[in-house]
Amino acid sequence: MTGTIGKEPYIEIRGVRKGFSFGAEKVAIFSDLSLNIARGDFVAVMGPSGSGKSTLLNMLSGIDRPDSGKVRIGDSHLEQMGESAKAAWRAHNLGIVFQFYNLLPMLNTAQNVELPLLLKPLSRRQRAERVDTVLDLVGLDGRQKQYPASMSGGQQQRVGIARAIVTDPGLLLCDEPTGDLDCKSANDILEMLRLLNRELNKTIVMVTHDPEAAGFARRTLHLNKGEFTEQFQREPEDLAPQPHRDEAMEQGVARQ
Amino acid sequence: MFSQLKQTAAMTGANLGSLPRRAWIATSMVLSVALVVAVLTGFLSMAKGFEKTLAGAGSASVAIVLGGGTNQEIGSDIPADLIRNLRANRGETGIARDSAGAAIVSREILVPIDVKRLADGVDQTLALRGMDQAGPAVRDGVALSQGRLFAPGSREIVVGARLAGEFAGFGVGDRIRLGSVDWTVVGQFSAGGSAFESEIWADIEAVQSAFDRQGQVQTLRARLESPSSLPPLRATLASAVKTPVAALSEAEFYASQSARTSSLIRLFGWPIALLMAIGATAGALNTMMSSVSDRTVEIATLRTLGFGRLAAFTATWIEAVLLSLVGAAIGAAVSWLVFNGWQASTLGANNTRMAFQLTVTGSVMLQAGLLGLAIGVVGGTLPAFVATRLPLSAALAGRG
Ligand SMILES: Nc1ncnc2c1ncn2[C@@H]1O[C@H](COP(=O)(O)OP(=O)(O)O)[C@@H](O)[C@H]1O
Ligand SMILES: [Mg+2]
């Protein structure tokens, strides 16, 4: 599961072409996109609306398939995998944070967070323990029984983050995670993502249109007309790939 | 595999939890299924009630002899030499004999007649049955409640208890015109609530002459020595005449009569119910399609979390099946409450009115319920398939 340390990047996008057809018309989004992301990196992707940011994330999550080219994450070549294989891969390796949280309104906080754990061979008690652990981590301990409708946007997004990390995935994909939040809540969420990156060594790819939000990332990429036009890097010394540790989350929680 | 179960259970739970959002359209599906089930239950319980009324009504020790290759009284014809032969036969015929040693047999003929009903003045078709003096003796449970039996050869009638109250001119001593001649009512009889109570009885020869049917006999009714005397009777009949005649026990006769009518009811009922079910299936399809579109974001979200297509299919399908199950249960329960024991009447075996009760049995509810369930099973399949094909990018795209 762990990629070769130091040699190969954790995420590798190489020569990706992707377009959408509107009836007979074919619109190219990417004609030749390449990108490496090291394990433990926190990448912000910025760019004008329609530049392909969400499409990029969708290819990283296996939701969209490139027309050609390769998308490798760890040892998994997503472009070669079938739907059910990708679903299983997502269940084990990926957490997604949505702009509109995408919580299930008929489920309470604990039930929402528990969902990804249902795909794992865990007992009810083990699941409840994990749920409590991550809810504690995102500062929502005690709100297990609360329903999404009764929570603020910031709280709902924290539930969304808890759900994304409850299976302890190596990679988090966030599409405008603060796009629907006020300034204060957005800051809390971004702090939390930074913490997950620093303390728990999660690799994070975050799409945002907010330069301040991008400031929380180690690296900012600008996407324009299907190409990366600009790069901005912070703390280059932190970018050395680190081994992913499965016990990282527990340690992180212990340190709280 | 275990994970698939948990996935499906979770997705199904989320589905059902979101049902209140679709309360109206879900209710409309439930009600249309209930309606189909109720309609089919109505027809089937009618057929069942008809069978039940006639089943067990017949005796195993009374034989009915029919001629002319029919299994109904109307159209049956008994050859005159058969009657002569039977009367002359002093041996073992299977037919019981009275104290004087005469075979207990009644020659019978049925004539439909129109009589005005008291309540609404509308003409009703009743059965006038010509019979021998042994007629009441070849029927179980028949008793004169008033007056006496008609005298041989005279224009006298006795009327069934059910008719007496419903029609004018059926009081003992009344004179009534049936056909082209006047008859005198000399008695009333009860017959244990059987279809006979809707008949008028008279002497066979009087009926033959009044309706210009001299010498015509449609059926013979005979009292058997025992239920096992039917085979000897059949043998006697076979050697007596060359034309085919059939001997059935009264029980067998009624069963065959009810089978015709009840299968006719079913023949009507099933196509109507099936047509309605096709309509309801289209409605269920529509309901479930809107359910899938209503849940697009939720389904896609779960799929991005790693939930499989099988769970998406099954959860949607289970919703359809559960809704139709609820509809079927409501339809069955309501029709049981409303239909069961409902009094109905139909034309009986001899073109005469026959009362019976609708009977909602377990098997009736099961058949109708399964049809209702099929609506969900079939109507939910395509939407369930659509649920597996939703573009997952819909989950990321926003609020849906
Ligand atoms: N499923 C799709 N079908 C057709 N066109 C799509 C689809 N997804 C995205 N697009 C198009 O691709 C372009 C890039 O979309 P997207 O990646 O969502 O941009 P961004 O997230 O940067 O705003 C847009 O023009 C959009 O209309
Ligand atoms: Mg976007």
Image (cartoon, helix red, strand yellow):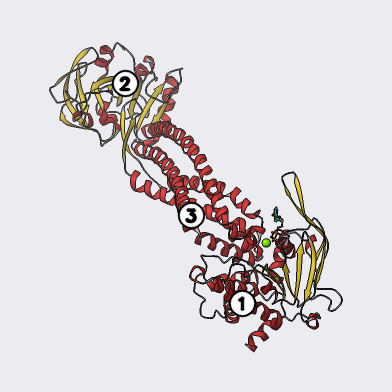
Amino acid tagged 3: Arg
In the depicted structure, whether residue A39 falls above or below residue A224: below
Q: CA distance from mark 1 to mark 2?
A: 98 Å
Q: Is mark 2 within 8 Å of ligand 1?
A: no
* Mark 2 vs 3: CB contact within 8 A: no
Disc 2 vs disc 3: which is toward the camera?
3
Front position among marks 1 and 2 = 1
Q: Residue at x 34, y 38 (%)?
A: B53
Instruction: Report, in whole angstroms, how far the alpha carbon at label 2 lies from the one at label 3.
Output: 61 Å
Can see residue A73? no
Helix, strand or loop under label 2: strand
Write down the chain letter for disc 3: B
Which label number is shown at residue B110?
2
Q: Give the labeled residue for mark 3.
A: B22
Q: Secondary structure at mark 3?
A: helix
Image height of B303 relative to A139, above or below: above
The quadrant of the rendering that contains the C terminus of chain A is bottom right
Q: Which residue is mark 1?
A: A187
Residue A151 in view of the camera? yes
Q: Chain of mark 2?
A: B
Q: Is residue B222 left or right of residue A49?
A: left
* Along the line of sight, the residue nearer the viewer: B371 or B204: B371
Image coordinates for residue B22, horizontal then vertical, percent: 48, 54
Residue placed most toward the observer, B280 or B1 = B280
Give the crowd class for mark 2: few <14, some 14-19, many >=20 residues within 10 Å: many
Q: Are marks 3 and 1 in contact (CB under 8 Å)?
A: no
Tell me which chain the residue with mark 1 is part of: A
